[in-house]
Amino acid sequence: MPKHTRGGRRPRIVFIEPAETQVRVLSREQTARLDAALSTLAEAPADVKQHATATALRDYQHDGIRVIFYATALGSILIVTYVEVD
């Protein structure tokens, strides 16, 4: 059974610069892959490994996609700071 945040409620995902700019230049195929990755990490953001240089940041990497983000204290919002899609 998959883990869910906040009793089954998924967090809202917000992009800040430079992630917002990075997302705007993705192709449709890349955007679809990123959407799938965001859905996966939204299920259990606390399970994503910590970023190497900042413990508040999480660094999700899978299948050519990298998303660096942090979650608000209650986990209701994921704030994406960096996006990379091969």
Image: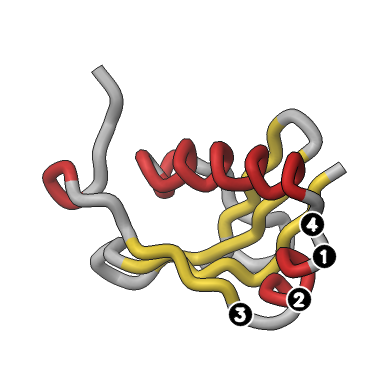
Residue projecting furthest to the right: 86
Circle on res. 16: 3
**Disc 2: which residue:** 21
Vertical placement of residue 49 versus 72, above or below = above
Mark 2 touches mark 1? (CB < 8 Å):
yes
Quadrant for residue 26, please give it.
bottom right
- Front residue of 28/30: it is 28
Quote the CA–CA distance across marks 4 and 2.
9 Å
Q: Residue at x 80, y 51 (%)?
A: 27
Looking at the rendered structure, the kind of residue marked 2 is Thr
Residue furthest to the top:
1
Is residue 38 left or right of 23 when viewed as pictured? left
Extreme residue toward the front, this view: 28
What residue is pinned by disc 4?
A: 26
Callout 1 amino acid: Val
Residue 66: x and y in percent read 73, 48
| Mark pair 3, 1: CA separation | 15 Å
Q: Position of residue 47 (x, y in %)?
A: 44, 39
Rendered position, 26 above or below 41: below
Q: Quadrant of the N terminus?
A: top left
Q: In which quarter of the image is the C terminus?
A: top right
Of the residues shown, which amino acid type is indicated by label 3?
Ile
Mark 3 vs mark 2: which is more N-terminal?
A: 3
Q: Which amino acid does label 4 sit on?
A: Leu
**Residue at mark 4 to residue at mark 3: CA–CA distance:** 16 Å
Q: Which dot, 2 or 1, sits closer to the camera?
A: 1
- For marks 3 and 2, give the CA distance: 8 Å
**Residue found 52% across the figure and 43% down from its top:** 48
Q: How many residues crowd around disc 1 within 10 Å: few (fewer than 14), some, or many (20 or more)?
A: few
Instruction: Determine which of the numbered discs, if any, sits on residue 25 in the image.
Output: 1
Instruction: Say which of marks 3 and 2 sits in front.
Output: 2
Q: What element carries label 2?
A: helix
